[in-house]
Image (tube, rainbow, N blue to C red):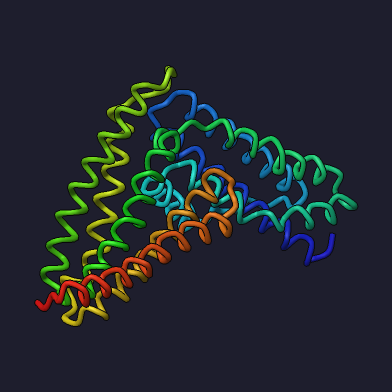
Amino acid sequence: MTEKTKSYLLSLQKNEITEHHIYTKLAKTIRSPQNAEILKQIGDEELRHYEIWKKHTLTDVAPDRIKIWLFYLISLIFGFTFGMKLMERGEVGAQTNYRLLSEEFPEAAQVAQEEKEHELKLLEMLDEERLRYTGSIVLGLNDALVELTGVLAGLTLALQNTQLIALAGLITGIAASLSMASSEYLSMKNRDSEDNHPIKGAAYTGAAYVITVFLLIIPFLVFSHYFVCLLFSLLIAVMIIAGFNGYIAIAQGLTFKDRFKEMATLSLGVAGLSFLIGYVVRIVLGVDI
């Protein structure tokens, strides 16, 4: 075995033992016995892979403590499904190296197959509440982005007063969030499914709507010029769309680009149209505030 090969095997060992500790640590904090067992099973598999490489290097390797705590915190904040899939996603390029290693170490092919198929299948079995209500979150988020960017754009030219725009936008947004939460509650209540929890669905929809409203209104409370406020509000809207779609793309294995373009086009398109409407209303009615 060359020094280069041994060095690479040691890096694989470090990665395997690190992920073993991450999965095991998370398994102890999850309430669901099913999810905890899945994570423990993956963690045990990572430990077995570590032992396979150790037979060749004859060396013990310490785990990466920073990586353990990093992914542990990411999983606590964004959900364990997101954290685990983000971690596995970063190892896609390792498959090529495994194929090269299999020429010298027959076990590499088995490890690669397990990494590629078995662990990913186990991750797909994870059942996390927040992901079950993605539809409700998307409903609240998308409606708030489309409606409030339009409202703020229209009010910007119609009122030209940041405090009035913020006040009107906040009242409109909170009222609309209550309306959307009520609609989602009634919609879920009429669906015939054991997994439906109308109150939770309404709460996720309302919360997503209200949080989006406050984020979009913040610029009108910070800056003094209404055009600057609108620009930052639209930038925040794009950032929310990008962040949420990035999260969903990783957690649920969906494509990012098409979903991002669709939501961004809707929100910014409605904002542009509302901006023109606000200008026309201001001219026709002769409003001057």
109 is higher (above) or lower (below) than 274: above
What is the x, y in percent for residue 152? 25, 66
What is the x, y in percent for residue 274? 32, 66
Q: Residue at x 63, y 50 (%)?
A: 60
User: In the depicted view, which residue is nearer to us: 247 or 262?
Assistant: 262
User: In the depicted view, which residue is nearer to us: 1 or 170?
Assistant: 170
What is the x, y in percent for residue 95? 76, 52
Residue 254 vs residue 109: left or right? left
Q: Residue at x 56, y 51 (%)?
A: 87
Q: Split into 4 quadrants, where in the image is the C terminus? A: bottom left
Q: Residue at x 40, y 33 (%)?
A: 129
State the image quarter where residue 231 is shown.
Answer: bottom left
Q: How many marks?
A: 0
Residue 4 vs residue 83: left or right? right
State the image quarter where residue 177 is shown.
Answer: top left
- Which residue occupies the extreme front position in the image? 284
Q: Residue at x 48, y 48 (%)?
A: 83
User: In the depicted view, which residue is nearer to us: 104 or 199?
Assistant: 199
Residue 253 vs residue 173: left or right? right
User: In the depicted view, which residue is nearer to us: 43 or 128?
Assistant: 128
What is the x, y in percent for residue 35? 48, 29
Q: Split into 4 quadrants, where in the image is the N terminus? A: bottom right
130 is higher (above) or lower (below) than 242: above
